Image: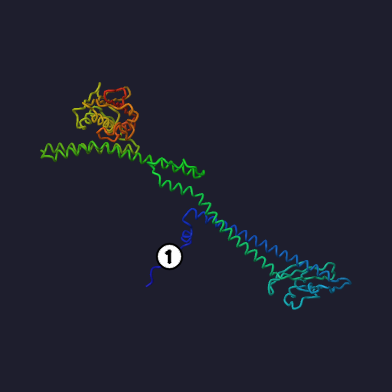
Amino acid sequence: MSGPRRPRPTAAALLRFLTPGTLRGRLSLVALVTATLLMLVLTVAFDTVAQHRLQHQADDELRARAAAVATTVDTGGGTVRVRESAHDDLLDAHVWIYAGRRLLEAPPAAGRLTRVAGALAGRGGRRCVTVDVHGPLRLCSQPVPGARSGATVVTALDLSPYRSSADTLLLGSLVLDAVMLACTYALTRLAVGRALRPVRTMTDQAAQWSAVASEERFGSIRHPAELARLGTSLDAILDRIRTLLRHERQLTGELSHELRTPLSRIIAELDWWQARPRTAEQTHATHRVIADAAESMRTICDTLLEDARGGTLTAPGTVEVLPALRRLTEATGLPGRVRLTVDGAPPVAGVPAALLERIVSPLLANACRYARTGVAVRVRSAPDGVRVDVVDDGPGVPPSFAGLLFEPGRRADPGDGHPGAGLGLPLARRLARSVGGEVAHDPGHTAGARFVVSLPAG
């Protein structure tokens, strides 16, 4: 039973297999293939020119010999005869003399060559032909000057030395091509490697750098123009990553900060409920408190997540400020320490109730945390909207820290014994500004701290 047939590799698969996986290898391969094609064309052209030149030299030598032999031919008196000379042995080697088609003189044992020479002489004029008789031979015919009877001299020359010279030139050119291709490949790999070295350095640097903690950037390092543009693009990507991670940390901290209060209420209610037996009415009250805290947590999550997505925080709406602040005051668990007042008619703010609570809640929590005796919350109408003042009689804000008050993660005295992460005030200001409002600190208020919330009117 035969096993499954293996699929035959296609040309595309074979090409992918042979193609190097690195950019350096691919560029070197492209340079090698290009140089190979160029060398092939140049070698063919060189070999053709060399063979043509060698054949031209052989023809020149044959005509020179024919001219020398023609001097021994006597055409006077209307007849053609060959005069004897001291160098007959040299002249008779591969030489045929014809009077018309009649052979006057031929080398011994010529055989087939004599027939070729006769055919060449019979055609008349200056002609050359190459034959292969025991090796390559070149034959040329040349009329004798002044011969009325049509005397012709045919000379032959062995082309083996010329062919050997041509083969030697071809072999030398091929060896030179191989050396040139090897040098081209090696130099290309070296040049590409040196050109890509900054890219490898940038890759190692990017792996070592921290997008959040490190301030290192590629733009501060000198690179060629192309890599400088690449470094600028990578710097922009690193900055965007750093911004996204900073926003993620900020969102996590704000959620933790805002969810701490309702979560503490749930834990306190559960502890109080489990401490001793409860009546049905008390159990129902505990459930209601837990449900309100859970609903508050959901509202907090929805509000902050919508803000993080950069869209509209909630659906547009209005809220009666006084009832909303009263609910917020009761949720602190210290309603007796918070005094809520209103100047004039109860105002209406042009923001949703959930957003109003998220803006005022951090201010109220800080005031309750640092107040010595109590907190005053004052609501009033203004020509351009609604104002909410949150005032406490605590130690206030140190003048040296006033400029850092709304920066995330900053606290005037982290070791003051009060919990907090320094995120509440920045969150309140950011949410207020998202609806066209503002949260500000009043540096002129000296007996404690005073924060002013400005919101658009409803």
The image shows residue 399, relative to residue 153, as above or below, that is above
The image shows residue 429, relative to residue 33, as above or below, that is above
Residue at x 55% of width, y 54% of height: 187
Q: Position of residue 282 (x, y in %)?
A: 12, 37
In-image side of 190 versus 153 (left or right): left
What amino acid does circle 1 point to?
Pro
Given residues 453 and 221, the one toward you in this image is: 221
Given residues 203 and 339, the one toward you in this image is: 203
The image shows residue 33, relative to residue 434, as above or below, that is below
Can the viewer see residue 458 in this picture?
no
Q: Quadrant of the N terminus?
A: bottom left
Residue extending furthest bottom?
109
Q: Position of residue 192 (x, y in %)?
A: 52, 52
Q: Position of residue 334 (x, y in %)?
A: 19, 30
Query: Looking at the image, how many numbered discs can be counted on the residues?
Result: 1
Residue extending furthest top?
344
To which quarter of the image does residue 412 belong?
top left
To which quarter of the image does residue 151 belong?
bottom right
* Element type at mark 1: loop
Residue at x 18% of width, y 28% of height: 336
Residue extending furthest front?
415
Can the viewer see residue 22 in this picture?
yes
To which quarter of the image does residue 315 belong?
top left
- Which residue position holds label 1? 7
In-image side of 231 versus 94 (left or right): left
Q: Identify the image's colour scheme: rainbow, by chain, secondary structure or one colour.
A: rainbow
